[in-house]
Image: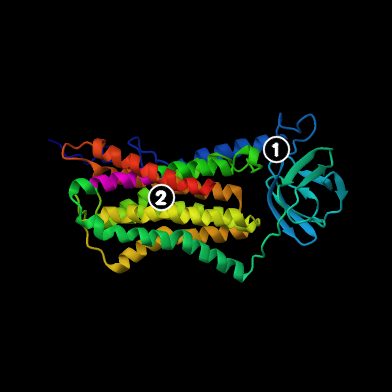
């Protein structure tokens, strides 16, 4: 057999094809489509974007009032442009009487926000109707049902919000975690029932969070839709679900599983605490925004209702740890993870409540809870591997019923 020493019989070198020509680098192959689309877009723009000139007819003017602040002798409105065209506000009327106002420029660019300050001697407890008249003759209506001075966002106010968040989140969750000794002494069948009860609690929280997020950004409420509106709730849910799944996989890589086919008790408790914490963030937003607009009675009812409502969340955290020895420090950490976000939510709601941000955060709470439910499901299976057996169904229904009944306090 002859030796293959001829130049033509040698294997092609790296970067060369079998025909002997050099191949293009991988990075250049990935760059070529990007360069071509950039050239196409540049050409389209250079030709003056044919077919995309100014729209016929009047401009589309869509302004929404995001925030109302009442100070002695003045009304402040934060207005956002939710439409495609810039809007010039020409006049402002309060209760059908034109009045002076001041703003940066009076023109609100697309997606931008402008603060309008209206000097007006409003009377506490009265209702007011405000009209913003644009330069094209369009009007934007905004109602104030009950005029109450907006609390000052000073250090004392934020201290109050922290205290309310503590009452709503940390204290009730900690009280609920005192069920741990009881959870550790019940038989396995009773523990499966409690785990199913936890699933029911979380399922109700996920549903409640989704509905609350949709309520925040519904079009009738005047919330801006240009940033996504109701889609932000589901975007937040999806992002939180994926983020929690990524965190979970990272934790799995660093610790051994204590249960076959499922996560350890401490791992499950951590996931439950994270999901509940994101939900309590939304509750804090509701409380903070209620106090920020001066709805003190509503804020007080929310604090009482959420406090009773959240006591059962402590049970949801300790239920997976029945067979796991946990230090007091770790239990305190879980309680803070679940309860402390209520304080952060109250601060955000009091300082700069924004419907779009609130919808995203509330949706994140719902998505995180769905992921936690998925992780809890193996722990409610019976000896035959069934997840939906009579005891688990009874636990799920009981959990949902408990939160439904305690939630009635919020509308009492």
Residue farthest toward the bottom in the current orientation of the protein: 155
Q: Quadrant of the N terminus?
A: top left
In the image, taking residue 349 as reference, residue 174 lies left or right, namely left
Per the image, label 2 sits on a secondary structure element best described as helix
Secondary structure found at label 1: helix
Residue found 82% across the figure and 42% down from its top: 134
Number of residues whose C-alpha sits closer than 10 Å to that of mark 2, classed few (under 14), some (14–19) or many (20 or more)? some
**Residue at the front extreme of this rendering:** 412
* Residue 197: in magenta span: yes
Kindly identify which residue carries mark 2.
243
Using the rendered view, name the quadrant where residue 47 is placed.
top right
| Residue 241 position within the rendered picture, expressed as x and y whole percent measured from the top left | 40, 46
Q: Is residue 135 visible?
A: yes
The part of the image, by quadrant, that contains residue 330 is bottom left
CA–CA distance in space, label 2 to label 1:
42 Å
Viewer-nearest of labels 2 and 1? Answer: 2
Question: Outermost residue toward the left?
Answer: 1
Q: Residue at 63% x, 38% y: name it.
A: 219
| Residue 244, horizontal then vertical, whole percent | 38, 50
Q: Is residue 260 visible?
A: no
Q: Is residue 393 above or below residue 191?
A: above
The secondary structure that most of the magenta stretch takes on is helix
**Left or right: 7 in relation to 217:** left
- Decide which of 8, 109 is in the foreground and name it: 109
Q: Which residue is mark 1?
A: 46
Q: Position of residue 287 (x, y in %)?
A: 55, 55
Whether the magenta-drawn stretch holds residue 131 is answered as no
Query: Is 300 in front, or is 338?
Result: 300
Classify residue 120 as left or right of residue 162.
Answer: right
Name the residue nearer the viewer: 167 or 247.
167
Residue 214: image location, x then y, percent: 54, 40
First to last magenta residue range:
192-201
């Amino acid at each position: 057999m002859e030796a293959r020493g001829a130049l033509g019989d040698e294997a092609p070198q790296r970067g060369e094809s079998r025909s002997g020509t050099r191949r293009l680098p991988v990075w250049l192959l990935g760059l070529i489509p990007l360069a071509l689309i950039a050239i196409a877009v540049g050409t389209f723009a250079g030709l003056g974007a044919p077919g995309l000139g100014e729209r016929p007819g009047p401009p589309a003017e869509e302004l929404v009032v995001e925030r109302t602040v009442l100070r002695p002798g003045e009304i402040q409105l934060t207005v956002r442009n939710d439409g495609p065209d810039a809007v010039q506000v020409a006049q402002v009327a309060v209760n059908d009487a034109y009045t002076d106002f001041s703003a940066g420029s009076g023109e609100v660019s697309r997606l931008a926000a402008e603060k309008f300050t209206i000097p007006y001697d409003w009377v506490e407890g009265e209702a007011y109707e405000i009209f913003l008249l644009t330069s094209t003759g369009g009007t934007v209506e905004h109602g104030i049902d009950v005029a109450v001075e907006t609390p000052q966002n000073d250090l004392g106010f934020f201290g109050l919000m922290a205290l309310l968040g503590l009452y709503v989140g940390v204290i009730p969750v900690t009280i609920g975690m005192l069920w741990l000794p009881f959870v550790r002494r019940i038989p396995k069948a009773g523990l499966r029932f409690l785990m199913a009860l936890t699933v029911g609690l979380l399922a109700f929280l996920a549903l409640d969070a989704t509905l609350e997020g949709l309520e925040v950004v519904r079009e009738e409420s005047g919330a801006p839709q240009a940033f996504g509106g109701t889609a932000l709730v589901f975007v937040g849910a999806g992002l939180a679900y994926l983020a929690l799944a990524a965190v979970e996989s990272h934790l799995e890589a660093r610790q051994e599983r204590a249960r076959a086919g499922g996560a350890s008790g401490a791992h499950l408790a951590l996931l439950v605490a994270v999901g509940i914490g994101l939900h309590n963030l939304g509750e804090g937003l509701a409380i903070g925004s209620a106090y920020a607009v001066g709805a003190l009675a509503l804020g007080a009812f929310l604090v009482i209702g959420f406090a009773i409502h959240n006591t059962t969340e402590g049970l949801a955290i300790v239920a997976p740890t029945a067979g796991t020895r946990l230090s007091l420090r770790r239990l305190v950490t879980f309680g803070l993870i679940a309860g402390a976000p209520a304080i952060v939510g109250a601060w955000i709601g009091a300082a700069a409540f924004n419907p779009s941000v609130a919808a995203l955060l509330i949706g994140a709470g719902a998505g995180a809870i769905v992921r936690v439910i998925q992780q809890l499901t193996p722990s409610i299976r019976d000896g035959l591997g069934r997840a939906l057996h009579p005891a688990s169904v009874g636990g799920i229904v009981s959990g949902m019923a408990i939160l439904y009944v305690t939630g009635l306090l919020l509308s009492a």
